[in-house]
Image (spheres, grey):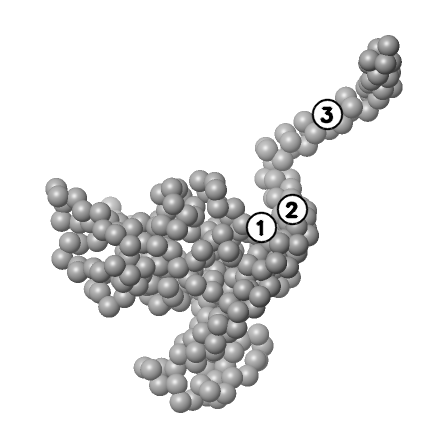
Amino acid sequence: MQKESSLRNIIIFIRRYITFFTFLVMEIICISIMVRYNQTYRATYANISNDVTGFFMNKYNNVEYYFQLRKTNRQLADENAYLKNFIITSLGKNGDTSTTKLLTRIDSLYRDTLGRNTKFIYSVAKVVNNSTTNENNYITIQKGSKDGVTTDMAVDGPDGIVGHVVAVSKNFSIIMSLLNHNSRVSVMIKGKPFTGVVDWDGKNIRELTLHNVPKTIKLHKNDSIITSNLSENFPPGLLVGRVDRIILDKSSSLMDVQVTTGTNFNLLQYVYLIKNTLYTEQKVLEQSTLQAQPVKK
């Protein structure tokens, strides 16, 4: 008897609100079609989605972040010491840092006592969402266009590089992490005459692969893999990871190297955005030069 009453109430409820639910379903279908086939609506939806998702992820992250405070504060203290040393080094010329001890903030750029600008400027951002279990992983940070964040900015972490910015809304930004099939970073083997590219094979979240290393290069376990001077985003010399093992191919003169990432992506709480102040100038010059080249007939 009670079951029949409950069933009758459900039927009455559906009859009463069938028009509303039909309208809601049709509205969702229409919006999805507009977003899918119209670039303007797609871009607007992406920005709104980033903001809404970022807002709720930020609330969730606040709880988790509370239990990581002690470790996070220690990481920040260590990283601040590193950044001070890096700023002094990046301003110096030919290793001379005698004139870079006094830094002042002028027009959002750091300058030394001779008025020279740094090429790279660091700013800190809080991680509010971070995926590590997908084939293509992304990180959401609580900084956006109003904070000066732009796409293609490099992202570093307390223990190694993290990735680069691929999408920006007003208050949040999306980072393509190294744990992404589309991620490619130009690297060097510290102290060795080799420049190559690392990527992720989608298996182990602590392993990257450095491809096509000549067998003539003598490698040892824990050799440092660092960003190269050919990277458009990253300053040279940042830690990417360390050599774990070598994969030999008897039929080739080349080998692949498994690299343990410096960053533990499961513990990431803060990241450092890196702005290349000369990036736009370099890209404009390179593109204009290519366009000016005569067409061969």
Binning the other alpha carbons within 10 Å of mark 1 as few (below 14), some (14 to 19) or many (20 upward) gives many
Identified by mark 1, the residue type is: Asn
Identified by mark 3, the residue type is: Val
Please determine whether, in this image, residue 161 is positioned above or below residue 1.
Answer: below
Tell me the SS state at disc 3.
helix
Residue located beneath label 3 in the image: 25
**Position of residue 180 measured from the top left corner of the image (x, y, whole percent):** 43, 46
Taking the spot 64% from the left edge, 59% from the top edge, the residue there is: 66
Please determine whether, in this image, residue 127 is positioned above or below residue 120.
Answer: above
Tell me the SS state at disc 2.
helix
Taking the spot 55% from the left edge, 83% from the top edge, the residue there is: 104
In three-dimensional space, the C-alpha distance between marks 1 and 3, rounded to whole angstroms, equals 30 Å
Is 281 displayed left or right of 7 in the figure? Answer: left
Residue located beneath label 2 in the image: 53
Residue located beneath label 1 in the image: 129
Is 10 displayed left or right of 80 in the figure? Answer: right
Residue 171 occupies which quadrant of the picture?
bottom right
| Residue 171, disc | none
Looking at the image, is mark 3 or mark 2 nearer the viewer?
A: 2
In the rendered picture of this protein, how many numbered marks are placed on residues? 3
Identified by mark 2, the residue type is: Thr
Binning the other alpha carbons within 10 Å of mark 2 as few (below 14), some (14 to 19) or many (20 upward) gives some
Sequence-wise first label, 1 or 3:
3
Sequence-wise first label, 1 or 2:
2
Is 93 displayed left or right of 169 in the figure? Answer: left
Q: Can residue 40 be seen in this view?
A: no
